Image (cartoon, rainbow, N blue to C red):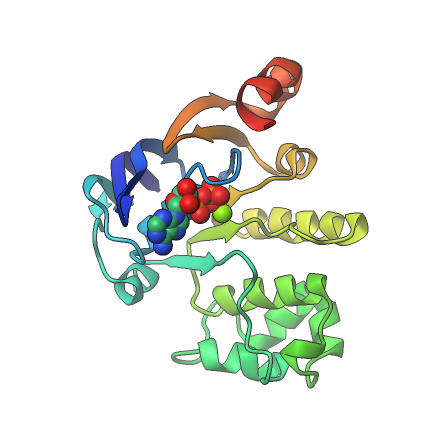
Amino acid sequence: MLRIAGLNAHLGRSHVLQGVDLDLPKGRICAVLGRNGVGKTTTLRTVMGLVAPSGGEVRLDGRDVTGWPPHLVARAGVGYVPEGRMIFPDLSVRENIRVAERRPARRWPPARLFELFPLLKEREKHLGAHLSGGEQQMLAIARALVGDPSLLLLDEPSQGLAPIVVRELGGVIRRLKEEGVTILLVEQNLRFAEAVADEIRIMVKGRIVYAASPDRFQAEEEAIRSRYLTL
Ligand SMILES: Nc1ncnc2c1ncn2[C@@H]1O[C@H](COP(=O)(O)OP(=O)(O)O)[C@@H](O)[C@H]1O
Ligand SMILES: [Mg+2]
């Protein structure tokens, strides 16, 4: 489904991605963990075409999409939910979804989105600015689904959410997996990543340095955490 090989990217003078390799088979959920500033967001932005790579490649179902502009990457089936959600504060829930629709949604028409996110249905006419953090996150995901992605990139979706909302988010992610959506998830919340992901990856200084199943990661976590994750 997604194959990232030897991906390099520079931001200003810093060499942020230094050869990222990551294979994500269709229908799987992969969580990428790592300290602040190691290049997790840049990886997602480079896949999405928002950062120009300086080397390496990104393939979707075998097709080389490296360096494609974001709208073509989106059309090739990639949905992106950025860190901080970026919903429109002055638009209602319904309008936030509607502006993402390029044509009538096929797999995720509003009725189906509202079935997946019942809370958004209740808030349909509320402004984005008046939603809780959890509702904003659900809306950001709903908006990405309107584009009918087969691959969803989620940047720290659990950030700032109360534990009960994080659990709800986990339910949504699992449901999306059942619907066949492949998910690349960047996270700081280890428990959450372990609970939802099929595969764990750890990034250090612009490279993936560790790959394991959640079970193995859990077993090795003590050592791994101090080595790669805590400050
Ligand atoms: N616009 C930019 N110009 C220069 N450096 C940047 C820019 N954006 C991010 N960086 C740097 O790139 C590195 C990786 O950032 P990022 O991908 O956001 O990390 P993460 O998501 O893992 O916290 C950081 O060291 C950050 O300071
Ligand atoms: Mg980040």
Location of residue 27 in the rendering, given as x and y in whole percent from the top left corner: 47, 42
Position of 201 with respect to 55 (left or right) is: right
Position of 148 with respect to 11 (left or right) is: right
Using the rendered view, name the quadrant where residue 112 is placed: bottom right
Q: Quadrant of the N terminus?
A: top left
Location of residue 114 in the rendering, given as x and y in whole percent from the top left corner: 66, 71
Q: Quadrant of the C terminus?
A: top right
Q: Is residue 143 above or below residue 37?
A: below
Residue 210 visible, this orientation: yes
Location of residue 98 in the rendering, given as x and y in whole percent from the top left corner: 51, 82
Using the rendered view, name the quadrant where residue 94 is placed: bottom right
Position of 25 with respect to 133 (left or right) is: left
Residue 45 visible, this orientation: no
Query: Viewer-proximal residue, 27 or 13?
Result: 13
Which residue is depicted at the point 70% across and 61% down?
134
Which residue is depicted at the point 52% across and 30% down?
199
Q: Is residue 171 above or below residue 207?
A: below
Which residue is depicted at the point 22% across and 40% down?
57
Q: How many marks?
A: 0
Query: Viewer-proximal residue, 105 or 226?
Result: 226
Q: Is residue 192 above or below residue 72?
A: above
Location of residue 118 in the rendering, given as x and y in whole percent from the top left corner: 73, 69
Question: Residue extending furthest right?
Answer: 164
Which residue is depicted at the point 69% across and 86% down?
125
